Image (tube, grey):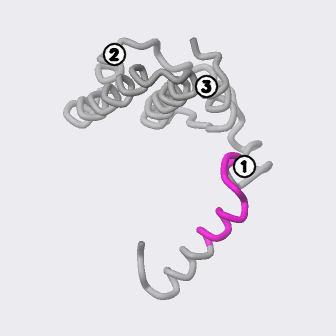
Amino acid sequence: GHSTLPMKYFGKFVVVGNQRTLAYLGSLLMMVLEADMEDDPDRRRFLLLSGLMMMEQYCLDENWEVAWRLLDLAQPDWAAFGAADQKQLRRESKNSFLADPAWIGAVVGRLKDEEKGGRKG
């Protein structure tokens, strides 16, 4: 089901709203993480390869419904994605809860320095 810790985190803190690409890819990443946490390398490999197949199919026909159904998995928990309050989360934090704030600050600082120097990437 969708009640595992990774899926709960994803539904609560990664507010994808109606961005179907993020919802599908994020759901798949959480399933890969679950397989890793359960020390199930066969399932992890299956999900990774299936994810590549899904992305390839979407790039060919731009139809997420077909691409996702190729995986033969339950649909993402669309209600959970719409339930989180994106504005409230942004008021609480501008940074990922999974990243060290100092690291985010360093990355932002580096990007600003690169923009000043005219370099991109």
Q: Secondary structure at mark 1?
A: helix
Residue 112: x, y in percent?
Answer: 57, 78
Image point (52%, 32%), residue name: 18
Q: Amino acid at mark 2?
A: Arg
Q: Which residues are magenta?
A: 96-108
Label placed on residue 90? 1
Q: Secondary structure at mark 2?
A: helix
Q: Secondary structure at mark 3?
A: helix
**Dot 3, crowdedness within 10 Å: few (<14), some or many (≥20)?**
many
Image point (57%, 34%), residue name: 17
Relative to residue 111, is residue 84 drawn left or right?
Answer: right
Residue 22: x, y in percent?
Answer: 47, 37
Q: Amino acid at mark 3?
A: Met
| Residue with the mark numbered 3 | 7
| Residue with the mark numbered 2 | 69
Q: Residue lying at the far bottom in this picture: please name it.
A: 117
Q: Main secondary structure of the magenta part?
A: helix
Picture layout, residue 73 above or below residue 58: above
How far apart marks 2 and 3 lie (CA) works out to 19 Å
Relative to residue 93, is residue 31 drawn left or right?
Answer: left
Callouts 2 and 1 close, C-beta under 8 Å: no
Q: Nearer the viewer, mark 2 or mark 1?
A: 2
Instruction: Indicate yes or no whether the magenta region holds residue 104.
Output: yes
Q: Amino acid at mark 1?
A: Arg
Which one is nearer the viewer's eye here, 46 or 6? 46
Q: Quadrant of residue 5?
A: top right
Q: Residue lying at the far right in this picture: please name it.
A: 92
The first of marks 2 and 3 along the sequence is 3
